[in-house]
Amino acid sequence: MYGALDIGGTKIAGALIDTEGRVLLRAQRPTPAREPAAVLMGAVTAVLDELARDPRWASLSCLGIGSAGPVDAAAGTVSPVNIAAWRGFPLVDEVRSHSGLPASVSPVLIGDAVAMAAAEHWLGAARGVDNALCMVVSTGVGGGLILNGALHQGPTGNAGHIGHISVALDGAPCPCGARGCVEGLSSGAAITRHALDAGWTPPPGTAASAESVAAAARTGDLRATAAYDRAGQALAAGIAATAALVELDLVVIGGGVAQAGDLLFGPLRRHFARYAKLDFTRQVRIVPSLLALDAGLIGAAAAAAAKTHRPDVEARAEAHSGS
């Protein structure tokens, strides 16, 4: 039995997952992103408490934590750009101290988009692919890389963090300290902000969000459509740059914003064709995640399982990739 946490700017999710990658139990709380560090940790604890009440928790062999980044996998700390109260926060130590966690289980930290890459390579759209970029487009934008058939995390666990590639040299300041980052142009918040700045307003009683902008775009609202076009262009520029650096076969896009479907993928593919002009970049395929919103949980569990009992996991992965 594998355990997983997926911590993002909108939600904190947890799950119990079996050895075939099936989510057996899920718990979730909203992320109190503007609250102090202790309140944020309280939401994580509430998710863990709910999982621990299930009898299967006693069979837990490992626990993976996928968190918005940057993360420091070696130190066990997180500093998510969109969660101001957590800077160098000792998340692994805090989770390890949970009273219900079996003593034999040591939590394993991984970036949330790297976790998504692990999941999609194990069971999803990137299965059997040697070189892939897997992206989460949601409250923030992150990425993880599969290179030469293996997950590439980098020394701190942040490799592939495409959300903080600058694609607009004189663009707006990003909370990370740079300007014109992909995240600042294509996240759910960026899409909403651009539509509002253009004069779009949500229907009465409806909150302004990427989902409500998508709903307006489907009715033909040009301001809403333009917000998704701009997001697609920023993503395309970042993906084309990444493809030129490491030679990709495939790009997988998941996360809440990706649920808009062709509203995002249409302009993304169109703009990518404009940016990817080198022969070895123009054939890269861009596809939606197959695991949708569970990818982060499944990938966190897979990363923890690989570190805890690698031979067992690698044997299963080979069996899946060959089927």
Image (cartoon, rainbow, N blue to C red):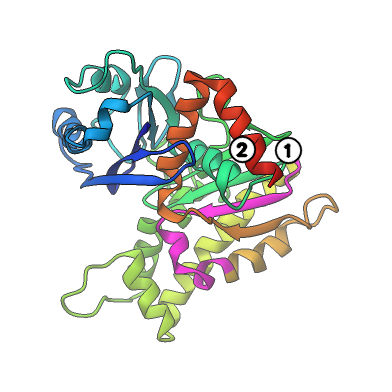
Residue at screen point 34% across, 18% down = 105
Query: Is there a contact, CB below 8 Å, between mark 2 and mark 1?
Result: yes
Task: Report whether 136 appears left or right of 275.
Answer: left
Q: Is residue 115 visible?
A: yes
Q: Is residue 105 magenta?
A: no
Q: Which residue is mark 2?
A: 145
Q: Which quadrant holds the N terminus?
A: top left
Q: Position of residue 126 (x, y in %)?
A: 63, 48
- Figure check: 60 above or below 319: above
Task: Report whether 157 appears left or right of 294.
Answer: right
Q: Which residue is mark 1?
A: 246
Q: In this view of the protein, which residue sits in the foreground, 53 or 75?
A: 53
Q: Closer to the observer: label 2 or label 1?
A: 2
The extreme bottom residue here reads 220
Q: Position of residue 84 (x, y in %)?
A: 27, 35
Mark 2 neighbour class, 10 Å CA radius: few under 14, some 14 to 19, many 20 or more: many
Part of the protein shown in magenta? 247-265
